Amino acid sequence: MVIIPKGSPVVENLNTYYLDVIKLIEHYQGEIGAGGIYFKSAPAQGVIYFDHDDILNGYYRDKDGELFGDEAIDLLMGAEHEYNFNIAIYYLTQEEVYFWSSLPTSERVYKDLSTEFTDLEGLIKKMSTEKFTSYIDVTIDNGRDQGLVFISNGEIIGGSFSWGKGDLSQTKEDIKLLIEETKKSGGVFQVSKMPIASENNSSADALNSSALSGGVSKMLEEFIGIFETLYASLKSKDADFNSLLRKKFVDNADRFLFLDPFVDEFEYADRKILFTGEVGDEELARGVITSVNEIAEELTLVDVFKRYSESWCKKYARKLDQLGIRL
């Protein structure tokens, strides 16, 4: 689904009939750093997300179906279009653009919740308590005002509001105003769950996590998963993520023997860790974190990955300190 920021675009009413979309994106990568380009025509619509270095993701929908990722990007950036699109460009902060780039693959879990039956403040608390990675799309008084609330692993990380200017420092005040307006004027909420950092563990996952004290397995699953999501957003990739990770584990097997795929003690698949070795939490965490950080450095993604994993670092600051790990 195409979700666009609720505030005013940087520029609007452009048309692909006379535009070179590739050059347009390059210009605004330098001009605003990060953002989204919204394409709209009567029969079709789409969006491309970018940061200052790369194109992160794309989505396209028409009467015949949907396209995601590279297929959508190639179609929207191509010189030949089946339709002429009107274009609007929205500024997004560097902190939020990676979350936005995952929106097209979100899954609607609650539809058309009304303030007659649901309190927005209580709904946000529910999402936080259940450690959802999700967003809440709010419409107030039949569209007079609108807002989006972004939640990552239960933590509010930002939002977008029809009266806002994309200032992260104002998010708490904006959400407070959003809640007050829904209480005063009524509203409707759509809740969608994001496909990243899933927290629904089976009993087998719980058993596996118990083999490592203090939730280290879960912490490392989230860490690898964050980088996997970032890697998936890259337009150009030399290998699939699991192959890239296994190669790095082989490279580091002399320092962290348990990572050697041929020893068969550590496995990461489907965003879950299966570990049967005997090393302690500190060595396990150090081996995994070192390997992922080295991949980030080799791909020149260090700064981007630091921004993307900032909430993870805050969440596990005490555990990392206990393990003697400095990032």
Image (tube, rainbow, N blue to C red):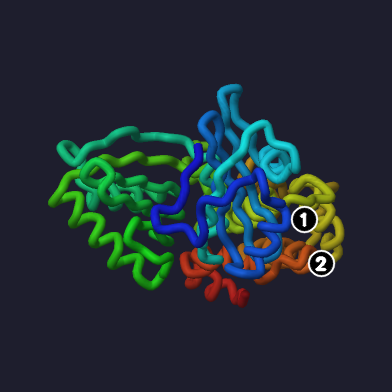
Q: Please, is residue 64 above or below residue 310 in the view?
A: above
Q: Please, is residue 307 above or below residue 56 in the view?
A: below
Q: Please, is residue 263 above or below residue 27 in the view?
A: above
Q: Mark 2: which amino acid?
A: Arg
Q: Residue furthest front?
A: 18
Could you say where residue 54 lies in the image, as x and y percent from the top left? 70, 59
Q: Give residue 259's mark.
A: 1
Could you say where residue 211 lies in the image, as x and y percent from the top left? 57, 51
Q: Residue at x 76, y 62 (%)?
A: 295
Residue 280: tell me if it is visible.
no
- Dot 2 falls on a residue whose secondary structure is loop
Closer to us: 210 or 306: 306
Give the side of residue 318 with respect to residue 164, left or right: right
Crowding at dot 1, Cα within 10 Å, few <14 / some 14-19 / many 20+, comes out as many
Q: Quadrant of the C terminus?
A: bottom right
Q: Residue at x 70, y 64 (%)?
A: 53
Whether label 1 touches label 2, CB < 8 Å = no
Q: Residue furthest left?
A: 184
Give the side of residue 291 with respect to residue 309, left or right: right
Q: Mark 1: which amino acid?
A: Leu
Could you say where residue 98 lies in the image, as x and y percent from the top left? 57, 56
Crowding at dot 2, Cα within 10 Å, few <14 / some 14-19 / many 20+, comes out as few
The residue beneath circle 2 is 255
Q: Give residue 291's mark.
A: none
Task: State the count of labels.
Answer: 2
Question: How much space separates mark 1 and mark 2, taking CA atoms?
Answer: 9 Å
Residue 182: tell me if it is visible.
yes
